[in-house]
Image (tube, grey):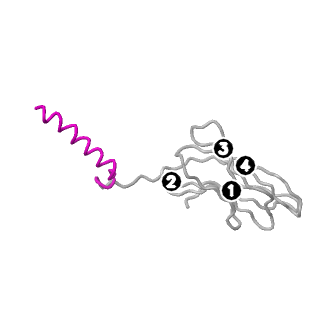
Amino acid sequence: MSNLSLILPLLVLVVVLFLGFAGCDTVCGLEPVTLPALEFSLQVVYPLTVVGDVKFTFLRPGHTTPETKTATQQGDLFVFSFDEREIGAWMVNCAMTGSVNGVPKPKVSPTGNFIMPDSGNWVYRFVASISSPDDFTFQALGLYSD
């Protein structure tokens, strides 16, 4: 009985270490869990040009303090992609200074509200375009599957 009481905990330890190093997904054939991807995107329609940075300000689900991130330019798109995504209700807006006929004007978009689904790749899209000869406007288009 005393040999069994010494061997049993060692066997349990070996199994736990094996699963820890090999991974439960490998041993048990489980699929890895992947979070849905999320990206914020602003399309700037020519002849409107951006002066300075494009910034996205957002409130994550369950948080009370908004965060602001600078977008990177990819052609006529300004994009911010997340490393960590959270499922639930989000709020987001976009701020930029646009140049219309050489005159810079700072503006903030309408706030977009959306529920982040629990699977898939998603983009929340904004568009900035000229609305009159000396002004521009934002549109929050919403959440789209990528």
Disc 4 marks which amino acid?
A: Pro
Write down the residue under mark 1: 71
**How crowded is the residue under tag 4: few (<14 C-alpha within 10 Å), some, or many (20+)?**
some
- Residue sitting at 77 percent across and 54 percent down? 96
Q: Which of disc 2 and disc 3 is earlier in sequence? A: 2
Q: Which of disc 4 and disc 2 is earlier in sequence? A: 2
- CA–CA distance in space, label 2 to label 4: 25 Å
In this view, the residue in front, 79 or 88, is 79
Determine which quarter of the picture holds residue 45. Answer: bottom right
Span shown in magenta: 1-28
Q: Which of disc 4 and disc 3 is earlier in sequence? A: 3
Give the secondary structure at mark 4: loop
- CA–CA distance in space, label 3 to label 2: 20 Å
Which numbered disc, 3 or 4, marks the residue closer to the eye? 3
Write down the residue under mark 2: 36
Percent coordinates x, y for residue 11 in the rendering: 21, 42
Q: Determine whether 130 is above or below 16 in the image.
A: below
- Residue sitting at 80 percent across and 55 percent down? 97
CB-based contact (under 8 Å), mark 4 and mark 1: no
